Amino acid sequence: MKGLPSISLYQVFRNRKRILNNPLPFHNENFQKYGDSFRVKVRSGGPVIFTRNPCLIKHLLQKNHKSYHKSPLQTVDLAKYIGHGILTSNGDHWLTHRRMVQPAFHRKKLMALISAMEVAIKGELLKIKSDTTIDVFPLMGDLAFQVVAKTLFSRNDIQADMATLKEITNSNQEMLIREMRQPYLKWWFRLSGQIRKHIGQSDEARVLLNKIIADRVNSGEKRDDLLDMLLSARYEDGATMSREQLLDEVMILFTAGYETTANALSFTLYFLAKHPLEQQKAFEEISKVLTQGETDITAISNLRYVSSCIEEAMRLYPPAYYIDRIAIEDDEFEGRNIAKGTMFLMSIYEIHRYDTFWKQPKDFIPERFATISKKELSDYYYPFGAGPRMCVGNNFAMYEMILTVSFLLQKYHISTQMNTVSINPMISLKPQKVALKFTARPAR
């Protein structure tokens, strides 16, 4: 990849304040100037390639995925805060635990979790007061967090522990973002004790989770929740996961499971509030499908327009707006040599808005997901990643979001005075604020 245009470390340093606040405009400027791929020299050990090339992305994630692993950004930097679970591991370790965790998210298993999911969602939506305007992002964060807690632990008496865990998760994420966007200050973060402080917070979170797990094991109860499924998972030799590995997987379920969903829900509700015709169409579908209040998987699957609204919101604001990979061996792509150690940062945000592949790419048009085939979409739509490492909880997340939007629109009409929504790119792509007004719908 040596022939690619290159961004110097000086240019990165000169734009450091912009990059720390929001790197996406800086990236877009360089994509517009240099094309679909460019190099950045920001670390020792090899170049970093930023790309929005759909063929290269497919090569990295699917066609030749065995030649690429997740990069140290996740397996080292993120892992030191949340452990080595399926999100932050590679190779045989990842494959073994992916096979153990995946059955917990099988369609049949998820059917047993729908009622718990529904209870958590409806409980959080009770916080909304009619004819008021609120920032919906914190509400969606609480909602998604409670859904994970309820489906994972089936407990109502751990709110204080869950609040502490959420605070630690957010605090450590902010620290990690500073490490990633200011690599030239990593020496100071270590020397000043900031990294040590946040690792200590992670240890505190693990103590909280370990107590909850120990309570379940000691009780001997079976609750058919995600924790039960993880406790009953077995290696090929019949052994169960160690407590440390179980804590790693639970930490990752919380970290990845609540925040990305909260972000996607907030953006979806913003777009529905901005587009009353699409909101009405979604409401009419909900009213038709959920006539008797059934919320089983069949009913959820029939809410196709609601699903399209969520997918369109994730196209415009993908929660995982970048995907990273590193070459573990020499490779070749379209005549260019890729040296072992080359890191790739694939811009999902850019490819989701690329006008070569999307008509009116900046507009909210849910209907496009009814007209584009899944095969076409697979080349330039990656809300949950792709290939063997596609998000294991993608169906769980979609069910949760469809239910949330449906329950909310059944009860309220939503509107907003916001012309645009400001974004806050952290580990996932967050909105800064989503101020929506909720007006009660007339009783039917």
Image (tube, rainbow, N blue to C red):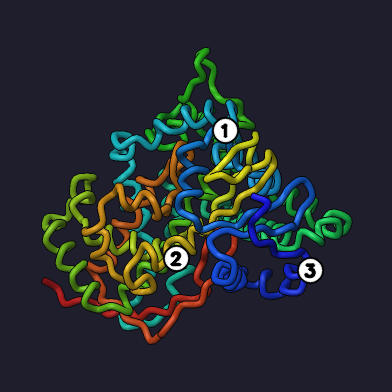
Q: Nearer the viewer, residue 92 or 8?
A: 8
Distance from label 2 to label 3 (Cα)?
29 Å
Mark 1 closeness class: few <14, some 14–19, many ≥20 residues within 10 Å: many
Residue 9, position as x, y percentages in the image: 77, 64
Q: Nearer the viewer, residue 258 or 424?
A: 424
Can you name the residue that lies furthest to the right here?
Answer: 191
Q: Would residue 207 be visible to someone looking at this image?
A: no
Residue at 52% across / 48% down in the picture?
254
Q: Secondary structure at mark 3?
A: helix
Residue 437, position as x, y percentages in the image: 35, 81
Q: What amino acid type should be assigned to the residue bearing mark 2?
A: Tyr
Q: What amino acid type should be assigned to the residue bearing mark 3?
A: Tyr
Residue 317: mark:
2
Q: Is residue 406 left or right of residue 211?
A: left
408 is higher (above) or lower (below) than 86: below
Q: Nearer the viewer, mark 2 or mark 3?
A: 3
Distance from label 1 to label 3 (Cα)?
43 Å
Q: Nearer the viewer, mark 1 or mark 2?
A: 2
Q: Nearer the viewer, residue 302 or 140?
A: 302
**Of the residues under marks 2 and 3, which one precedes in the sequence?**
3
Residue at 40% across / 55% down in the picture?
380
Residue at 49% across / 43% down in the picture?
59
Q: Which residue is mark 3?
A: 10
Q: Which residue is mark 1?
A: 246
